[in-house]
Image: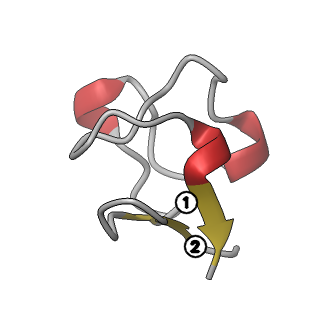
Amino acid sequence: MKKYVCTVCGYVYDPEVGDPDNGVAPGTKWEDVPESWVCPLCAVGKDMFEAQ
């Protein structure tokens, strides 16, 4: 699975790890991350992430 990087702060979303602190379970594909999810470091939306 591809990782996605925040173009604002550099946070990397790794699907294998997910973001359990913010309701995204490990193993969640990027496509399945809710549109309401925001970067845990800088709070921008999914539209500010690019495939790594």
Q: Is residue 23 visible?
A: yes
Q: Which residue is mark 1?
A: 15
The outermost residue toward the right is 31
- State whether residue 26 is above or below residue 8: above
Secondary structure beneath label 2: loop
Image mark count: 2
Task: Give the position of the N terminus as an image quadrant.
Answer: bottom right
First-in-chain label (1 vs 2): 2
CB within 8 Å, label 1 to label 2: yes
Q: Picture coordinates of residue 46 (x, y %)?
A: 60, 40
The x and y percentages for residue 50 are: 65, 67
| Disc 1/disc 2 C-alpha distance (Å) | 7 Å
28 left or right, relative to 12: right
Say which residue appears at 78% left-offset and 44% top-offset.
31
Say which of 3 and 46 sits in front: 46
Three-letter amino acid code of the residue under disc 1: Pro
In this rendering, does residue 28 appear at all? no
Q: Residue at x 31, y 36 (%)?
A: 20
- Corner quadrant of residue 52: bottom right
- Amino acid on which disc 2 is placed: Lys
The residue indicated by pointer 2 is 3
Q: Nearer the viewer, mark 1 or mark 2?
A: 2
* Position in image of residue 3 (x %, y %): 58, 73
Where on the picture, by quarter, is residue 39? top left
